[in-house]
């Protein structure tokens, strides 16, 4: 307030330029600088957020954790956001907004660096393998090593002995650092949107504010594209690149044990976020207030009139001094009024359920593509960034354009949003038909005795053909037999000899591969992808179409939220909606989606120091039914709730229309009655008046 008062004195005494439009930095230039800085900050936070989604499988494998824990890590961002959103929204508007945003960007970058920190603490990545990199040696150790019965457990397997070095390991799991870093990212992201948008709205002219906000939102859509592309690039690079010789790595990016350089993307995202903070430190706390065009020379009275215009008071209504106690007293009744609004309550329920479906689906979609269609993490992320995200952005933009062209009212917007969601729902049902046959893995998806039929009964890993070998049942080191069947390890395939080294190792005399016992096996899964390769393009095409159609209803749906309530409740309604969706959708959805996906695992990995690790192979049929079934079940519930929502909205609109007509009639009737009374007074007046005076007086009253 002091700054604006000083500006006011300058304008009154300035002579040649009463609006003081030329300070050291032009206000127009400062606002444009702020717009560019805010767009870059939006880009940085969207990039790091989407990169987090793209590294889900990498983090699972690196830290040997199940999907539900990844859901906890993913939801921790929203937890951090909720911790400070109330304080930032209230106090941030009264402080130096650009500097508050700068602090937020610095916190985001620190959080991103903390996420990458475990890579530099926990040492090199080790995975289960019987393949060794041997130089100038023709004698390789036998995968099938005989052992005395005294060393075996009751079920005929080797006793589980913890790996060496486990005693010195910290009891605190390293994924905790990732969770804490993500919480800090959430705290840092909080001021960017509310303070950035309010700054633009306060200091931009009314006609430019919408354009500027649109530019910022558009840039924020570009961020996820680059985030997923960065995820694709890093997933191709081995996790310990630069620390190990790549020729010694015996697995490929399509292997379920492969971990990409997940940490590298977080370092890049952290640097970009840190750079986005720099411009905000040099921007002013406030800018000259936009208003009507002021002539070059004007009197102090004219300047004072412009400064006191209703438009400017509206712009600075947030700065009016109101005691905290008064606001607190008014808050509860206002919130009660808002939640008593039936249409808003139904809208809130519908969007929470829809967002549960959407967030769960988007979080695990790259993983679904990897597991179901046997694509690498790199390819899954690339397709998400290049195909899916642009389709969503185009859908949101087209939805806003169609709403403007069709001039939809509130009911039209509701029907449009419901219609697009319903069409997307119907098209999504076809995903159930796009199935891939599960990989043929002996002892997991089929038995050693019947290798022609896939079944999900519990099959024994040990049978007559590998009974002479002493194998570990927990190892996952798949080899592809000459018969086209994948075996869990060379030992369980009964292979007695091996030749070559690294990825070129060939195992021979594998007793489980053929009856004669002289069949060979090579490293890695068998490439049974014919049916998936044919189906995958259709899946992608349908995915793009459904994403576009569902996104069409995004903008009209949001406009419905704004228009269905009274203007004075708008800010609270938007804030409470954001709070409710983050709390009831953003946090729980990734957790329970991950927990349900975990139930479809067929073979769990083993942690180096004991305990269950990441899943190595899923029951793809159960995965598809669980993932798609949960997504579509939530949407079904939301459609059912929409039915009473439409009835209540129709009643509200009819009541508003009826009140408007009654109001117009009441006002019109009152005006006519006043006119009649005035005519009666004039006609009954005893004092003589000139006819022209009567006419003038009547016109004045009218």
Image (spheres, grey):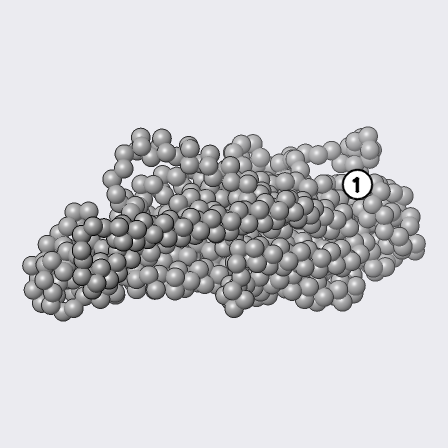
402 relative to 637, above or below: below
Residue 140 sits in which quadrant? bottom right
Q: Which image quadrant is residue 386 in?
A: bottom right
Q: Please indicate whether residue 11 sits to the left or right of residue 163 in the image.
A: left
Residue 328 coordinates in the image, percent (x, y): 35, 32
Pick whichever, 458 or 510, lies toward us: 458
Which residue lies under the disc numbered 1?
A: 470
Looking at the rendered image, the quarter that the C terminus falls into is: bottom left
Q: Position of residue 558 (x, y in %)?
A: 51, 53
Left or right side of 469 for 185:
left
Picture coordinates of residue 53, whole percent (x, y) = 55, 52
* Along the line of sight, the residue nearer the viewer: 12 or 41: 12
Does residue 198 lie above or below 473 as drawn?
below
Residue drawn 42% across the image and 44% down it: 569
Q: Residue at x 11, y 68 (%)?
A: 297
Residue at the (33%, 35%) spot, across then down: 327
Query: In the visual, does 159 lie left or right of 126?
Result: right
Circle 1 Cα neighbour tier, 10 Å, few/some/many (<14 / 14–19 / ≥20)? many
The mark tally for this picture is: 1
Q: Is residue 238 visible?
A: no
Tag 1 secondary structure: loop
Residue 576: % across, % down: 46, 41
**Left or right of residue 3, residue 89 in this image:** right
User: Going 75% across and 59% down the picture, which residue do you hit?
Assistant: 430
Q: Which residue is at the front of the view, 314 or 180?
A: 314
Image height of 616 relative to 30, above or below: above
**Would residue 344 be visible to someone looking at this image?**
yes
């Amino acid at each position: 307030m002091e700054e604006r008062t000083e500006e006011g004195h300058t304008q009154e005494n300035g002579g040649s330029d009463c609006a003081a439009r030329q300070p050291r930095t032009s206000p127009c230039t400062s606002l444009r600088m702020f717009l560019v800085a805010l767009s870059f900050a939006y880009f940085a936070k969207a990039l790091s957020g989407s990169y987090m989604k793209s590294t889900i499988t990498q983090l699972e494998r690196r830290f040997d954790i199940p999907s539900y824990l990844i859901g906890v890590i993913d939801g921790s961002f929203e937890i951090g956001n909720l911790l400070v959103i109330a304080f930032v929204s209230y106090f941030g508007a009264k402080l130096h907004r650009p500097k508050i945003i700068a602090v937020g960007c610095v916190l985001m970058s620190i959080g991103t660096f903390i996420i990458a920190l475990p890579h530099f603490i926990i040492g090199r990545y080790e995975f289960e393998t019987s393949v060794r990199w041997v130089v100038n040696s023709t004698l390789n150790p036998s995968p099938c090593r005989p052992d005395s019965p005294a060393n075996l457990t009751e079920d005929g397997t080797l006793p589980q002995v913890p790996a060496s070095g486990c005693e010195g390991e910290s009891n605190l799991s390293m994924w905790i650092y990732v969770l804490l870093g993500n919480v800090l990212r959430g705290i840092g992201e909080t001021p960017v949107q509310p303070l950035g948008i309010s700054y633009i709205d306060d200091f931009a002219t009314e006609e430019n504010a919408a354009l500027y906000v649109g530019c910022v939102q558009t840039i924020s859509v570009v961020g996820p594209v680059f985030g997923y592309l960065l995820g694709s690039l890093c997933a191709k690079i081995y996790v310990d690149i630069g620390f190990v010789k790549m020729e010694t790595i015996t697995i490929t990016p399509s292997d379920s044990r492969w971990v990409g350089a997940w940490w590298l993307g977080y370092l890049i995202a952290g640097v970009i976020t840190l750079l986005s903070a720099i411009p905000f430190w040099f921007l002013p706390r406030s800018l000259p207030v936009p208003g009507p065009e002021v002539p070059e020379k004007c009197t102090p009275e004219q300047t004072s009139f412009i400064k006191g215009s209703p438009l400017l008071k509206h712009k600075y209504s947030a700065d009016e001094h109101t005691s905290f106690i008064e606001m607190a007293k008014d808050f509860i009744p206002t919130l009660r009024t808002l939640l008593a609004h039936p249409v808003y309550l139904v809208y809130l329920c519908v969007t929470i359920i829809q967002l549960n479906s959407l967030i769960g689906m988007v979080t695990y979609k790259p993983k679904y593509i990897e597991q179901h269609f046997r694509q690498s993490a790199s390819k899954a992320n690339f397709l998400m960034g290049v195909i899916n995200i642009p389709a969503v952005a185009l859908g949101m933009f087209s939805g806003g354009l169609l709403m403007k062209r069709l001039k939809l009212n509130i009911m039209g917007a509701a029907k449009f949003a419901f219609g697009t969601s319903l069409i997307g729902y119907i098209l999504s049902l076809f995903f159930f038909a796009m199935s891939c046959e599960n990989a043929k893995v002996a002892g997991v998806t089929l038995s050693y005795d019947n290798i022609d039929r896939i079944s999900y009964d519990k099959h024994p890993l040990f049978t007559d053909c590998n009974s002479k070998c002493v194998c570990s049942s927990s190892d996952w080191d798949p080899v592809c037999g000459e018969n086209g069947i994948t075996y869990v390890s060379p030992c369980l395939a009964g292979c007695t000899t091996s030749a070559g080294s690294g990825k070129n190792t060939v195992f021979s005399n594998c007793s489980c591969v053929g009856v004669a016992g002289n069949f060979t096996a090579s490293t890695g899964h068998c490439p049974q992808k014919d049916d998936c390769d044919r189906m995958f393009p259709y899946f992608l095409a349908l995915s793009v179409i459904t994403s576009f159609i569902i996104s069409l209803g995004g903008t009209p749906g949001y406009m419905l939220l704004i228009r269905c309530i009274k203007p004075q409740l708008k800010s609270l309604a938007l804030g409470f909606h954001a709070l409710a969706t983050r709390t009831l959708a953003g946090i729980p959805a990734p957790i329970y989606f991950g927990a349900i996906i975990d139930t479809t695992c067929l073979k769990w990995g083993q942690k180096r120091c004991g305990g269950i690790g990441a899943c190595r192979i899923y029951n793809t049929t159960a995965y598809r039914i669980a993932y798609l079934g949960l997504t579509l079940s939530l949407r079904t519930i939301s459609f059912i709730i929409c039915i009473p929502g439409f009835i209540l909205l129709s009643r509200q609109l009819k009541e508003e229309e009826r009140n408007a007509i009654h109001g117009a009639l009441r006002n019109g009737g009152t005006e006519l009655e006043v006119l009649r009374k005035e005519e009666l007074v004039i006609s009954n007046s005893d004092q003589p008046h000139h006819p022209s005076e009567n006419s003038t007086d009547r016109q004045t009253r009218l």
